[in-house]
Image (cartoon, rainbow, N blue to C red):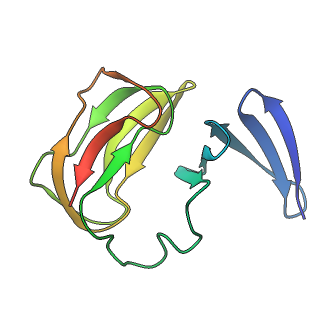
Amino acid sequence: MGKVTRVGPGVYRVEHDGGRQEIVYVAGPRGSTWAFWNGEIFHETATSAPSEHSGQARPMGPRTLSSPMPATIIKVMATPGSPIKRGDTLLVVEAMKMELPIAAEYDGTVKAVHCREGDLVQAGQTLIELE
């Protein structure tokens, strides 16, 4: 079992495996929490089921990628019509003085891009539509 220590607003130090320490950044309101750890973004909502994104199954219908927190768009790599693979970084945002990559959750195609480099975006704002 590990130890979690709050270091600052939205910043936690997690100690595990005999003293190994890692920093986890957390943002968002209760019921829609975002965490950034080890280059990955995790999002938990009050209505999401644990198996919602397990495996390689592609969700039905159009899906969107949203900003995990208020941020600035640093780089947009996605273009409408482009094929994508699960794990491809589609854009990078900057928040809390950190660059956060936003990656595809499944294979598909970029339907639309709703942001440009330099845009200021809000938490939950749709940035990219996928199909």
Residue at 21%, 46% (x, y): give it. 78
Tell whether 29 sits left or right of 105. Answer: right
In this rendered view, identify the residue nearer to me: 39 or 59. 59
Residue 35 position (above or below residue 53): above
Q: Position of residue 76 (x, y in %)?
A: 25, 37
The C terminus appears in which quarter of the rendering? bottom left
Q: Position of residue 105 (x, y in %)?
A: 38, 62
In this rendered view, identify the residue nearer to me: 2 or 63. 63
Tell whether 42 sits left or right of 18. Answer: left
Residue at 51%, 33% (x, y): give it. 69
Residue 118 position (above or below residue 89): above
The N terminus appears in which quarter of the rendering? bottom right
- Furthest residue in direction left, as rendered: 81
Q: Position of residue 59 (x, y in %)?
A: 33, 70
Residue at 36%, 78% (x, y): give it. 57
Q: Position of residue 4 (x, y in %)?
A: 86, 47
Quadrant of the image occupied by residue 128: top left
Quadrant of the image occupied by residue 32: top right
Q: How many badges with numbers are in the image?
A: 0
- Furthest residue in direction front, as rendered: 47
Residue at 49%, 75% (x, y): give it. 54
